[in-house]
Amino acid sequence: MTTDRRTMLGALGAAILGSGLSATEARAASSPARRSKTFILVHGAWHGGWCYRDVAALLRAEGHVVYTPTLTGLGERRHLGVNIVNLDLHIEDIAQVFEFEELADVILVGHSYAGMVITGVADRLADRIAGIVYLDAYVPRRDGDSIRKIQGSSVGDATAAMGADGWSVAPPPPESFGVKPANRERVARLCTPQPLAPMLQELRLTGKHLEISNRHFVYASGWGTGGQTPFRRFYDELRTEPQWKTHVMPCGHDMMIDEPRATANLLLSI
């Protein structure tokens, strides 16, 4: 054993004794499972970064780094963008978080509509993403996919419901997403009109997003008629594909609001 190695091991032993940890506890504390992870949590339509408040608090309490950006034109940024907001801009919103926070090895999470956003980000920044998680979200599979193409007539219904501003759609009632009664007032109060253009624009993909091998889909089974929701189809497709890991949470669509602990635990398992 070299002197340098003896010195290093001696210092490590002193640190363990000084900390009051046993050698086993110290090994556990320094294991990969205990290392800090970095999460970017992207909200869905009508929501904002506010919807991840409780999940973010739980992850940060475990020592992880969490970003909850709000997309342009929504939440506290509802006064921005006006009628220029589209899917490309929302992808840019998240890509700039990577850029200016100098992030790599990120677990990128998207809820609902944000499945389109995180796929676009992943196609640009696959080498900086350690895992990608779709929380009851759209999963575009092909270049040129859009929510209009994936979902069909219900987007047409949304167009008919467009507000007086001519570019956004008012939020639906929280109960339509299966939000728990205790949380409905808050969700209704904080949701804002959703720009329609991002739901109509086609997503351009090169296929680079497929280089991310750590891919997860979480299906919320506790809402909809007989479990049939716009997102059930993705669960049914992906659970048979070996490159995907699928999960089921028996809750409403807004799992991060209704089930923050279960959502945080699932993210920590990835």
Image (spheres, rainbow, N blue to C red):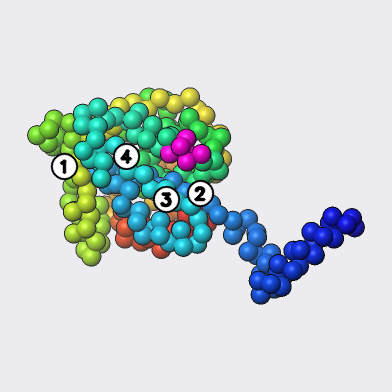
Numbered circle sitting on residue 218: 3
Q: Nearer the viewer, residue 128 or 138?
A: 128
Which of the two discs, 1 and 4, labels the residue nearer the N terminus? 4
| Magenta-colored span | 97-102
Residue occupying image coordinates x 48% and y 52% = 65
Residue occupying image coordinates x 46% and y 62% = 61
Residue 72 visible to an observer of this rendering: yes
Numbered circle sitting on residue 182: none
Residue 242 visible to an observer of this rendering: no
Magenta stretch, main secondary structure, is: helix
Residue 237 lies, in percent from the top left, at 43, 41
Q: CA distance from mark 2 to mark 4?
A: 19 Å
CB under 8 Å between discs 1 and 2:
no
Which of the two discs, 2 and 4, labels the residue nearer the N terminus? 2
Secondary structure category for the residue under label 1: loop
Give the foreground label among 3 and 1: 1
The residue labelled by disc 4 is 71
Give the foreground label among 1 and 4: 4
